[in-house]
Image (spheres, rainbow, N blue to C red):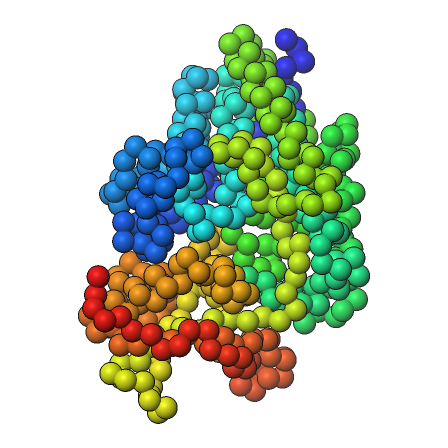
Amino acid sequence: MEWFSADQYWLGRLVFQRALAAVYLVAFLGAALQFRALIGERGMLPVPRFVERVPFRKAPSLFHLHYSDRFFALVAWTGCACALALLAGADSLLPLWGAMLLWLVPWVLYLSIVNVGQTWYGFGWESLLLEAGFLAVFLGNDETAPPVLVLFLLRWLLFRVEFGAGLIKMRGDECWRRLTCLYFHHETQPMPGPLSRYFHHLPKPVHRMEVAANHFTQLVVPPLLFTPQPIATAAACLMIVTQLWLVLSGNFSWLNWMTIVLAVPVVDFGSTAAPAHSPATPLWYEVVVIAVTVLLLGLSYRPARNLFSRRQVMNSSFDPLHLVNTYGAFGSVSRVRQEVVIEGTADAKPRQDSQWLEYEFKGKPGDVRRRPRQFAPYHLRLDWMMWFAALSPAYARSWFGPLVERLLEGDRDTLRLLRHVPFPQDAPPVYIRARLYRYGYTSRRELRETGACWERTYVREFLPPTRISSPR
């Protein structure tokens, strides 16, 4: 079938596949390095307890068959190995069916992790990676030209990511409609980056232009992805530029990078890197791609209906395999930044003059003199959830108590998630407390004079001094 293939997208497919493999690598590496404290056998939300109460059909995962920390580590590091192989181009050395199987492996492994990850894996970019990863299985390799249907499905995914984010803003916080949300967002976002402070101090007219440009890119440009070239290429390039602006302004895990990756195969590179004679497409491959396309278009009904619903939800999956999802971000924007600060003391009984020492996290603000660092696309899961905890204790109900308990025990895996621990592992604190502070950027003058990039004000007690009577 001549219509089945699109020769002008060879290079776009190649760049997409290698970039997607890089995102997979980051995701699996984060899972391997953080899982023990978060969802391991002795983690805050252990996988064994989860699989006991949630059946396989609701959360398909290899860990329903068996779980141990060693097995999870094997899954995560195998995912890293597969991602490295794909990044190096191993799929191009295999027959078409072998390349498809190689792309299927990281998808199955990461699906298994996400479906037991609970609160720690409840972010939209997890589903985004899985949906894009599933489509990559059917995108082919050097034995066939890129299939038009899969390229269309990738554009449909990119459309939902951008358009969904635009609609949730217009239906959500009024500051998006007033063009004023960025008066606050660069300061109150979950994890500021090294340039976020400078973005925050831009003049207000520039902030309003930022929001207007964002609305244009997310509400006007997405339909242009389905128009003829070169209009579709121009739309994709505009999305890439906008996402790079967001990369500079904060730490949003791999959300921005995945959006950029999805925009690449929209770009028409012409005959660049395409073979002189396109190889024939196997009939079995055409049948498989058509069947998968029909399946995904059928599953798209609920996400499409959600886009145009007044009760639009964001970052939700409508099937346990995360095949077609709904996306969106920051439907509401916090006006004030609050942070939960955890402290410990070695005193046998807390007194008014007790010395409380502060635990420092790797990414979230703590020490007012420590400037934010760039971590994205790597995702610091505990740091992100601490931001949610500051918004409302309800977000932390399931895991904050276990976190405090492990700090009181000097749990090695939990301490590894932190930047600075004020107590030796073999001499943990007797009491832990948590306090809520309001944080704000200092002015340029204050930064020069004091070296502090943040100022903070005590708000209230988040957790009173707490101890455990005996270790577990």
Height in image: 280 above or below 269?
above
Q: Is residue 163 left or right of residue 327?
A: right
Q: Is residue 379 left or right of residue 192?
A: left
Q: Where is residue 253 in the image (x, y as percent from the top left)?
A: 51, 52
The answer, for residue 88, to whether it is visible in the render is no
Give the farthest residue toward the front: 53
Front in this rendered view, residue 99 or 314:
314
Q: Residue at x 67, y 54 (%)?
A: 331
Q: Where is residue 308 in the image (x, y as percent from the top left)?
A: 73, 39
Q: Which residue is drawn at 57% across and 42% down?
A: 316
Q: Is residue 189 left or right of residue 57?
A: right
Height in image: 452 above or below 360?
below
Residue 302 figure quarter: top right
Please state, as top left, top right, bottom left or bottom right, where the C terminus lies in the image: bottom left
Q: Residue at x 43, y 47 (%)?
A: 118
Q: Position of residue 72 (x, y in %)?
A: 30, 42
Q: Where is residue 361 in the image (x, y as percent from the top left)?
A: 41, 67
Please state, as top left, top right, bottom left or bottom right, where the N terminus lies in the image: top right
Q: Is residue 228 left or right of residue 276?
A: right
Q: Residue at x 33, y 49 (%)?
A: 46
Front in this rendered view, residue 176 or 408:
408
Report the number of discs. 0
Height in image: 192 above or below 430?
above
